[in-house]
Amino acid sequence: MTAPLLIRGPLDVPGPEMADHLGAHGALPVVDLHGLVERAALTGRGGAGFPTAAKLRSVAAAAAATGRAPVVVANGSEGEPAAAKDAVLLVRAPHLVFDGLALAAAAVGATSAYLAADPALLPGLARLLGDRGDRLGVRLRPVAGTFLAGEESALCAALDGKAPLPRSKFPPVRERGVDGRPTLVLNVETLARLALVARGNDAAASSLLVTRRMEIAGTSWVDVVDVALSSRLGDVLRLGDGVQAVLIGGYAGTWVEAGRAAHLTLDPVGLAQADAALGAGVLAALPADRCGLRETARVVGYLAAQSAGQCGPCLNGLPRIAAALDVLARPTPPPSGLLADVHRWSGLLPGRGACSHPDSSVRLVASALRVFEPELALHRTGRCTARTAQPFLPVPGSTR
Ligand SMILES: Cc1cc2nc3c(=O)[nH]c(=O)nc-3n(C[C@H](O)[C@H](O)[C@H](O)COP(=O)(O)O)c2cc1C
Ligand code: SF4
């Protein structure tokens, strides 16, 4: 479970000053970033796990083809309500993110860069940025704080002064993003890892920041740890009798039974065995005294409300599924055919939206109906295993 530590010491200690950063990591070297990132096999930590070297190459190629200087964007939006790793990183090790931005910009020939993050973090970041004296002028921008605002096309739209909504995947932002320029959007953790890889620390590419959510002795616990991708999930989270299932990847993720989850390794191949992926790096251990269907219904209600309603699946499908799930989450016999309807509607959504929001939402629903099948059966008889109605997963604006 130990890994090269990106997050060191108690998480409430303010981020290191430039002198601390240089003392810990040394000066930023001049390197062939493309080759190093390719060799280290670094993948994105913003959700999709896309190879970073391929992104660098495609943005550089788009810039060469169009003759327009590209833009680099550090994505610190962290729209996922269950995640905290990007905010913790920006407080604990912001200079690694700034280093990564400078390196990525140099690698693709960008002359302008943005870092988008929670408005509360920006004053501290502005001061630290001022201490660096970088030639690259990084512009700090606040994010909208919605689930969709961190999707790359939504973020580029916001940086252009438009509504923070996803748009069609074509042309991709790597060809036409901010100001119509080829745009490289990388998650802040990816950039921090890139800064470590550039310093010869290849192991930085094989660990990741995880936001852990669990209950210890009836008290909610949330922290951020840096763990090796080869770690067993059972060594990262306490998965004793008091845990029934793990939400892997966050609200665009998948429920897995606790007993099965314990044996999975965190690398993409290990998690794929349970049709899971690390997404935004969330691991949430659902206590045995909660109703998994109720928790999922709250989350899916939130996801349906967050969708921009610009595309059919989000306008018609997601709200219907959320409403049906809300009924199935109650300990009363549901109207006949409702479960079959949810499965049928879910099958109609994937691949039909401008972004992957409906696809991941119905994947979450399918995993809940599979993992909490015994709970569904109990609800049909008017019963529920939950011993408390206290919400476990955080849903902005909800107390149900
Ligand atoms: C609905 C949705 C929300 C997203 N929210 C975030 C986010 O909050 N932060 C983030 O870094 N990436 C988010 N992404 C992924 C970005 O679109 C993009 O792929 C990512 O920032 C690229 O960085 P990476 O290659 O370093 O992973 C989201 C994607 C989708 C579909
Ligand atoms: S699929 Fe949904 S969330 Fe994505 S752009 Fe269309 S309406 Fe918005």
Image (tube, grey):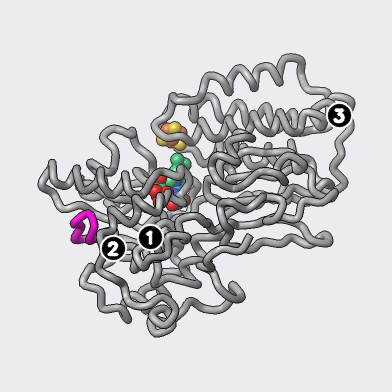
Residue wearing tag 3:
378
Q: Residue furthest top?
A: 337
Q: Residue furthest bottom?
A: 19
Q: Position of residue 366 (x, y in %)?
A: 64, 29
**Disc 1, SS:** helix
Q: Residue at x 25, y 59 (%)?
A: 32
User: Is tag 1's residue or tag 2's residue first in the polypeptide sequence?
Assistant: 2
Q: Is mark 2 within 8 Å of ligand 1?
A: no
Reply above or below: 26 against 398: below
Q: Residue at x 49, y 60 (%)?
A: 86
Amino acid at dot 1 = Leu
Reply above or below: 182 against 201: above
Amino acid at dot 3 = Leu
Q: Quadrant of residue 337?
A: top right
Residue wearing tag 1:
194
**Disc 2, SS:** helix
> Between residues 341 and 248, which one lies in front from this camera angle?
248
Q: Is residue 151 visible?
A: no
Amino acid at dot 2 = Leu
- Tell me the number on the disc at residue 103: 2
Q: Is residue 203 left or right of residue 70?
A: right
Find the distance from the CA under tag 1 to the CA under tag 2.
8 Å
User: Residue 108 lies in magenta, yes or no?
Assistant: yes
User: Is tag 2's residue or tag 3's residue first in the polypeptide sequence?
Assistant: 2
Q: Position of residue 224 (x, y in %)?
A: 60, 62
**Disc 3, SS:** helix
Q: Which quarter of the rendered picture does the N terminus lie within?
A: bottom right
Q: Is residue 244 left or right of residue 103?
A: right
Q: Which residues are magenta?
A: 106-111
